[in-house]
Each structure stands twice: as C-alpha cells, then as structure tokens.
Image (cartoon, rainbow, N blue to C red):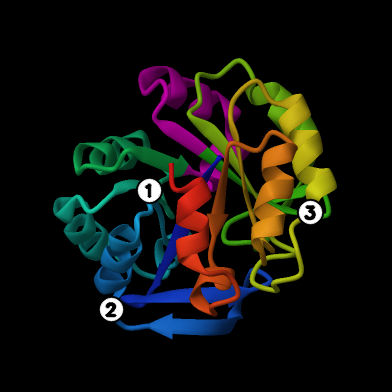
Amino acid sequence: MIAIPAVDLREGACVQLVGGEYAQERVRLDDPLGVAREWARLGFARLHVVDLDAALEQGSNLSLIRDLLREQVADVQVGGGLRSSEAVSDILDDGARYAIVGTRALEDLEWLAELAHDNPGEIIVAADVRERRVTTRGWQRTLPRNVIDMVEEMNAFPLAALLVTAVHREGQLQGTDLPLMEDVVEAADFPVYAAGGVSSVGDLHALQDRGVAGTVIGMALYTGAIDPRAIVEEFAA
C-alpha cells in the first residue's frame, strides 16, 4: 500500500479542512510548493494535489499546480474542477501522473466511461462519501445512490483507481471508516484508495489488511499526529 500526502490548495495556500466543511479550516501554509518539496524530500513517491477553489468554481490554483508539475519532485495525482475531457487531457499533458475526476464523473457515468477508455490507467475517480452516500460539487450535493452500487457500475471502466473519502471522518483524527473501505474493496475490480480520518500507523495497517491499495493522508501529517518518516519506511511506494 502506498501512502500519499495531501496537498489541498485554497487561495494559493496549502490547507486542511475538518469534516469536509470549508468554514472549518484548521491548517493553512502559505508555501504549497515548499510543502510539496518537503514531502518529496522525506521520501514520499506520490502527492495528492487538489484545487479546492476549482472544485467549488470559486477560483483556480492551476498556475500553482503547473509550477509543481514542472518541478517533477514526485509523481502527482491532480484533481479539483476537472469537469471536461479537455481539462483532463491538459493536466495529463502538463505532467500529472493521474487525473482525479469527481463531480462530473459521478453524475455522468457515460462521460466517465468515455474518459477512462480514452485514458486507460490514468483516471482516478474521487468519491466523497458521507454515511455511504456519495456527495459532489464540493460536498454540496448528495447523490441518491449508495457508493457500492456506483462502484459496481464503474467496474467495466479501465480506471487507475477509486479514491473513497469518508468525509464524515475527514480531518478529525478519529480513525477511518474501515467497514466502508472493506465493502468498497470487496465490490471493486480496480484498486481502491482511502482517505478521511487516518490518525495513526495502526490505521494504515488496518486499511492495508483490508486490501486498500493506497491512502491519502492529510491532517495527521500536518499536525504531527503521525511521524512521516515512520510512514515512508513502510508505505512510501
């Protein structure tokens, strides 16, 4: 299992939110490129970069993301506001290893199918989940379908992975939603990544034991709850 530090961008800063609420910003660092360089220096092989402003259609951090991609400090998976095939192609051309799609992919599975077949092995679908329901549009809309039903519909697509974020656990350092992740892994024919609530190396072991292929870690790294060096030893790649 690979551990992937989160570099969430908002208004040009690297931030961490609590519980998927934009009003609950707990961490703000004004040098995102410096943050990314430090994670790479410590030995992390991949970074998870999300443009929160673009996700809510309230701005863009694209120039900052392009600067990071040009530096090639690590493999980067990029998401946030990628709602067209052209935007996905552009970010991949800019040097992203994977493009992360969420809102449109989850609301328009026909578009996702076409996108995945045009870019096999390069698309990660991000499903933000509250109590087994998928949320979109920056956590503002809840879809009627259960996440497991959606996973089964996506199994035919050549996806790189599905990233499931337990939004109800995000940023709270109270442990991840293991039953949710276990059920998703069992239902999926592609790799599953987990996010939300990771607070210890024990959480990482528990996810790994349940077949999770990767974990995105945010708050625990930024607050020092987890020693990044300990993670790199076991889960850097």
Residue 183 placement, left or right of 162: right
* In the depicted structure, whether residue 187 falls above or below residue 48: above
* In the depicted structure, whether residue 41 falls above or below residue 128: below
Which residues fall within the magenta stretch?
A: 101-124
Amino acid at the residue labelled 2:
Asp
Find disc 2 in the rendering and name its residue.
Answer: 31
Whether residue 3 is visible, yes or no, is: no
Amino acid at the residue labelled 1:
Arg
Residue 100 placement, left or right of 26: left
**Cβ atoms under marks 2 and 3 closer than 8 Å:** no
Dot placed on the residue nearer the N-terminal end, 1 or 3: 1
Q: Is residue 28 magenta?
A: no
Residue at (17, 60) in percent of width and height = 67
Packing grade of label 3 (10 A; few <14, some 14-19, many >=20) is many
Q: CA distance from mark 1 to mark 2?
A: 18 Å
Find disc 1 in the rendering and name its residue.
Answer: 46
Nearest the eye: 224 or 114 = 224
Residue at (29, 43) in percent of width and height = 96
Image position, residue 110 (x, y; %): 55, 24
Q: CA distance from mark 2 to mark 3?
A: 31 Å
Dot placed on the residue nearer the N-terminal end, 2 or 3: 2
Amino acid at the residue labelled 3:
Asp
Image position, residue 6 (x, y; %): 46, 61
Residue at (22, 59) in percent of width and height = 68
Packing grade of label 1 (10 A; few <14, some 14-19, many >=20) is many
Where is the N terminus found, in terms of image quarters? top right
Q: Quadrant of residue 109?
A: top right
Dot placed on the residue nearer the N-terminal end, 1 or 2: 2
Find disc 3 in the rendering and name its residue.
Answer: 177
Image position, residue 129 (x, y; %): 72, 52
Image position, residue 48 (x, y; %): 43, 54
Number of callouts in the render? 3
